[in-house]
Amino acid sequence: NAGVMQNPRHLVRRRGQEARLRCSPMKGHSHVYWYRQLPEEGLKFMVYLQKENIIDESGMPKERFSAEFPKEGPSILRIQQVVRGDSAAYFCASSIGTRGLVEQFFGPGTRLTVL
Amino acid sequence: GENVEQHPSTLSVQEGDSAVIKCTYSDSASNYFPWYKQELGKRPQLIIDIRSNVGEKKDQRIAVTLNKTAKHFSLHITETQPEDSAVYFCAASNTGNQFYFGTGTSLTVIP
């Protein structure tokens, strides 16, 4: 059973470009969470999604950031018109989510560098 | 919303000694408290968790205690080894809708 997959692992973008980060949850998991981690800091919640639904996006900036988790395919975190301050590690985590099984398992992260 | 505070931010112990990391939370509705270990450049990995209907949970050298009244929970690592060196994060969640993480504790075990 493969773990949570994220790609790309490293992404370099110039200011103003778009960044697309992908997350494939563990098999059988239908809940996905995205977090941002700045160097030597903790994990900041961004958004929580279930298949085809955004459940909680209170941690995500209102502008330039969007997330989706379609019926088929990976969850995508999209950052438009990136700025240097967007440079960070972005982790996704997945859980079964039902029957009280809320344990989260993290992917390896995507390290975004904005030049 | 929930606010999780974690102390200390850095901790150095001699190999074989115990390490204790403490977290407090503010939302009495939080009922699930996981701990994660993150090695440099790696993903956070769940090492132990506890739910609000339990006061203590142990897994070999790792234990977690929860005091619901005081709203704090702690991670205890006994007989520390160099490979325990990492950053440890606590978190609190209510029904799994959102997880609030502490700011992390960088643990160094000195051989």
Image: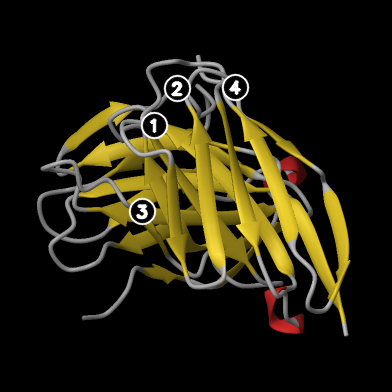
Check disc 4 and report the residue beneath it: B3
Mark 4: amino acid: Asn
Residues tagged 2 and 1 counted as in contact (Cβ below 8 A): yes
Pointer 3 and pointer 2: residues touching (CB < 8 Å)?
Answer: no
| Tag 2 residue | A58
What residue is shown at x 17% (from left), y 51% (from top)?
A30
Q: Earlier in the sequence, mark 1 or mark 4?
A: 4
Residue A115, can we see it? no
Q: Is residue A94 visible?
A: yes
Q: Are marks 2 and 1 on the same chain?
A: no
Protein chain holding label 4: B
| Circle 3 Cα neighbour tier, 10 Å, few/some/many (<14 / 14–19 / ≥20) | many
**Residue position for label 3:** A104
Chain of the residue where label 1 is placed in the rendered structure:
B
- Residue B96 found in image quarter: top left
What distance separates the C-alpha of mark 4 from that of mark 3? 19 Å
Query: Rounded to the nearest whole Å, what is the CA distance between mark 1 and mark 4?
Result: 12 Å
Q: Dot 2: few (<14), some (14–19), or many (≥20) neighbours within 10 Å?
A: few
